[in-house]
Image (tube, rainbow, N blue to C red):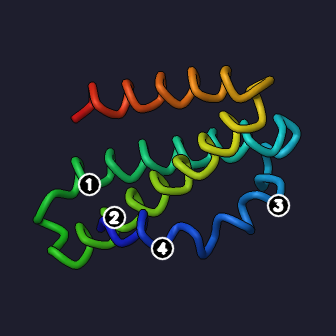
Amino acid sequence: MGLAYSLKFLWAPIIDRVDAPIVGRLGRRRGWMLIAQLFVGLGLLAMALTGLKAGLLTLGALALVVAFSSSTQDIVVDAWRIEVANDGDELGLLSSAYQLGIASRS
């Protein structure tokens, strides 16, 4: 499932140039953040509800949806952080805060 993060460079240009479907009026970054977070949540909920009774293949497909959605969210958050920073110092602070959040989740 970690392969989704390794290959996110393949769909990052599309995410960067295309507005999110349905919620595009929120803005390109916010729309994709919302969609990615919804798919992560729905995928995890589906994994929890189905478990192994639906079969290992189904569970693996749901895990792939979660991994793809999570890496898409990572793309969008990185782009948002770069766009929102006024200068290099602020970008450094935002990057540090993001890494602190990542480290605290581990």
Three-letter amino acid code of the residue under disc 4:
Leu
Q: What is the C-alpha distance between the residues marked 4 and 2?
A: 18 Å
Mark 4 vs mark 1, CA separation in Å: 23 Å
Where does residue 29 sit, x and y in percent of width and height?
Answer: 74, 41
**Residue at (77, 36) in percent of width and height:** 83
Q: Residues within 10 Å of mark 4 (few under 14, many from 20)?
A: few
Secondary structure beneath label 1 = helix
Q: Nearer the viewer, mark 4 or mark 1?
A: 4
Residue 1, percent across and down? Answer: 29, 68
Disc 3 residue crowd, few under 14, some 14–19, many 20+, Cα 10 Å? few
Q: Which amino acid lies under the numbered mark 3 shown in the image of this protein?
A: Val
Please identify, in this view, whether the residue under mark 4 or under mark 2 is nearer the observer: 4
Whether residues under marks 1 and 2 lie with C-beta atoms below 8 angstroms apart, the answer is: yes
For label 4, the residue is 7
State which tag comes first along the sequence, 4 or 3: 4
The alpha-carbon separation of the residues under discs 3 and 1 comes to 29 Å
Residue labelled with disc 2: 62
Q: Which residue is mark 3?
A: 18
Q: Is the Cβ of the residue at disc 2 closer than 8 Å to that at disc 3?
A: no
- Marks 2/3: CA–CA distance: 25 Å
Q: Which residue is mark 1?
A: 47
User: Seen in the image, is 98 located left or right of residue 27?
Assistant: left
Q: Nearer the viewer, residue 2 or 89?
A: 89
Nearer the observer: mark 2 or 3; the answer is 3
Mark 1 / mark 2, whichever is N-terminal: 1
**Residue at 35 percent of width and 72 percent of height:** 3
Residue 61 vs 16, above or below: the answer is below
Q: Are marks 4 and 1 in contact (CB under 8 Å)?
A: no
